[in-house]
Amino acid sequence: MCRAVRGSVGLLLAVLLAACGGGGDGADRGAAASSGTAGRSASAGGGGGVAGAAAPIPAGTPGGATPGEESDDGGRGRVGDSDEVAGPAPAGDRVSADHGTLGPTPAGQAAEAPAPHEATSGAETAGVYADPRGGVFAEFQRGFDRDHPFSSLEAFCFPHDEPAAPRRPTDEGIGADSVTFVHLRTRIEEIVELGFAAPVGDPTDMFETFTRIVNDRCGGVRGRQIDLRLVEVPGLGFGGTDIDTLRNAACIEATEDHKAVVALNTTSFQGTALLCIAEEHDTAFIGNQALPEEYVQRGDGRLLTMATTLEANLRALASRLVAEGALEGRRVGVVAPSTPGEAEATETSLVAGLEAAGVDVRFFDVLDCSGTSVCTGGMSASVQRLIEERIDVLFPTLNAVSLPLYLTEMVAQGVPAGAVQFYNSDFNSHGNEVVAALVVTFGGDPAGALYDGTVLLVHADAGRFREPDYRPAAFDEMCMREYRENSPLGQDYDPTDPAETSKYGMVGLVCSVYRTALRALHDAGHNPARADVFAALENLGPVDVPGMLPASLAPGKWAMSDSLLPVTFRYPCPGAGRSGEAETCLVPSDYSQMQVGAP
C-alpha cells in the first residue's frame, strides 16, 4: 500500500464546524485583532461588560422562587461544601407559544410573544419533554431534569438560590465572585479572503449575549459571574509559523494568562494544542468537532466534543458499508491530511477496518499540509495513483480547504463525473452544509459534479430543514429566541432559509456548548475546585445538542454524540429554492436509518 510523505504539523481548517460554521458576519472583529490574542472580557459584573448591549429579558425562577429568595424545598443540586441534595421545586403549569405545556410558571415572567418559527411541539409531563418524533427521541428526553436552572426549554437559564454559606476562592480561575471561561475563536475570515464563504453569523456576539443572560438575568452560576475572555486564533499558518504552533500559543494565552477553567470553541480548534489545554494545563475544552480518540483519552475527561471521535465515526462508516455489501468487488483508495492525529486516526480505524473485512484497499495517501491548512503536498501524485489503480471508491478525510483542491486535481487529470463513488463522514466537518458547499464554491461545477452522490455518515441532522414537514427542535428555538431578544445585533435567523440555516445552527451550537459548561459548573457545588467542575462535566448524563439528537456524557464517555445518520451530497440540489448560492445540499435519510448508541 502506498503512503505519501507525512508532514508533522498540518492543521486543517474544517474551520466551519460540525453543526454550523465559524465567524462569518463578525469577520471584522478578528481582522482588527492581533495574531494570537484578544483578551477581551464579556462578563457583566465579573470582569467587564459589552457596550451597547441589549437588556436581557427577565425570567423568573422555576418553582416560583424569586431571585435571592429560598424556595420551600431549599433549591436543587449540591449545596455549599456539604453533600446535601435537595429535590425539585413544586410545579404549576404554564403554556409556551413555542413548546406546548412546560410545567412551572416563573414568578414575575410576562407571557412571551410567539416565536416567528414554529418549533417542534411537545409537552412536559412530570418534568419530561414529550418529543413529538417519539421512539428513541422521546426515550432520550426521560433522562433530563428540565427544572434544572440550566436545562430548561423555556429559557437559557433561570435565577437560582444561593446557599447561605459564603463563597470563597477555591482554585485558579475560580474566585469568590467569578469563574473564568475562554471563548477560543478561529479567525475564519482569513479563509473568506481566499474565496471561501462562511455564512454563520457572529459567534463572538453569540457568546457575549449568552454571557449577559447568565450574569444579568440569572445571577451567574450560584452567585459567581462568568468572566468570559476572548482568545482569537489565526485560521491559516503564516510568516513561516505553522498553524499548530499558533494554536499552541492560543492555548498558553487561554490557560496561563487567563487561567481558564473551561475553553469553549465552535469554529474548529485542532492539533496538539488540544493536548496543551486538557493534558498539560488541566483545563476543560468543549467543542463540536470529531477529535482523535487518543487525544480524548489523554484528556482524561477534560477534552469533550459534541460529535464522536474520529475513529468511532470512521469505524462506523466502514462497518456500515461492509454490512451493506457496498464495497464488494470495488477498488478502494483513502486520502488523509498530515494534521497531527488525523492521518493516524484514519489509518488505525478506517484503513485497518476495511482491510480486516477483506476490502481491496489499493492505496492510503497522506498529503503534506506543510504547517498550514492547505494540504497539497503529494496531491498530484496521489491522483495519478488513483487513476493508475483504477480506483472506483474513495474515502477523502481531507479538510474543508483541501478537499475541493483534490477534486479539482482529479478533474484536471481527466477523472470523469460518476467514475468514483465517494464516502465521507464528520471527519473535518464534511457533514456540515457550509463545509459541503465549499466543494463548489472553490472547486466549481466540475468538482461538484464529481462529488455528487457522495454518501456521508454524520452526527448532526444535516439537511432536515428542507423537508416539507420540518419543524425546528424546541431547544434550537429557545436558543434563537434568547439570542434574538438579547443581542444588540437583533438578528433573527430562519432555519428553513438556505441562506440563514447555518447561522441559525451556529446560535444553537454556541448555546449548547456554553450551557453544557454552565450545567457542570452549577452541579459542581457551591465552592468547587477545578476537579469538581471536570467531574461534574463527565457526569452530566444527557445533554442538549442542536436538533435534540441523542447525546450524553458519562465517566469514560467524553464524545457526546449517541447517533449517526447517513446523508447524501447533491449537486445541483434537487428542487427549486432548496439550496444556497453554491446550489449544493445534503439530503438526509429517514430516521429509521439512524444508528443509535455510542459508536
Image (tube, rainbow, N blue to C red):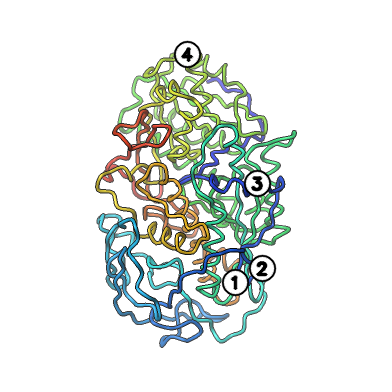
Type of the residue with mark 3: Val
Give the x, y percent position of residue 54.
Answer: 52, 65
Nearest the camera: 154 or 380? Answer: 154
Q: Earlier in the sequence, mark 4 or mark 2?
A: 2
Dots 4, 3 in contact, CB < 8 A: no
Residue 142, image x and y in percent?
32, 65
Mark 1 or 2, nearer chain start: 2
Q: Secondary structure at mark 2?
A: loop
Q: Nearer the viewer, mark 3 or mark 2?
A: 2
Return the residue at label 3: 233
Of the image marks 3 and 2, the number of the one nearer the N terminus: 2
**Residue 54 appears anywhere in the view:** yes
Residue type of the residue flagged with mark 1: Gln
Q: Earlier in the sequence, mark 4 or mark 3?
A: 3
Q: Is residue 48 above or below residue 387?
A: below
C-alpha separation, residue under disc 4 versus residue under disc 3 = 38 Å
The three-letter code of the residue at mark 2 reads Gly
Q: Which residue does the numbered mark 4 point to in the structure image?
A: 387
Asked if the residue under mark 2 is in contact with the one under mark 1, i.e. CB atoms within 8 Å, the reply is: yes
Q: Secondary structure at mark 4?
A: helix
Residue holding disc 2: 47
SS of the residue at dot 3?
A: strand
In the image, what residue occupies the spot 65% across and 44% down?
31
| Residue 88 appearing in the image | no
Secondary structure under tag 1 reads: strand
Question: Label 1, on which residue?
Answer: 225
Q: CA distance from mark 1 to mark 4?
A: 59 Å
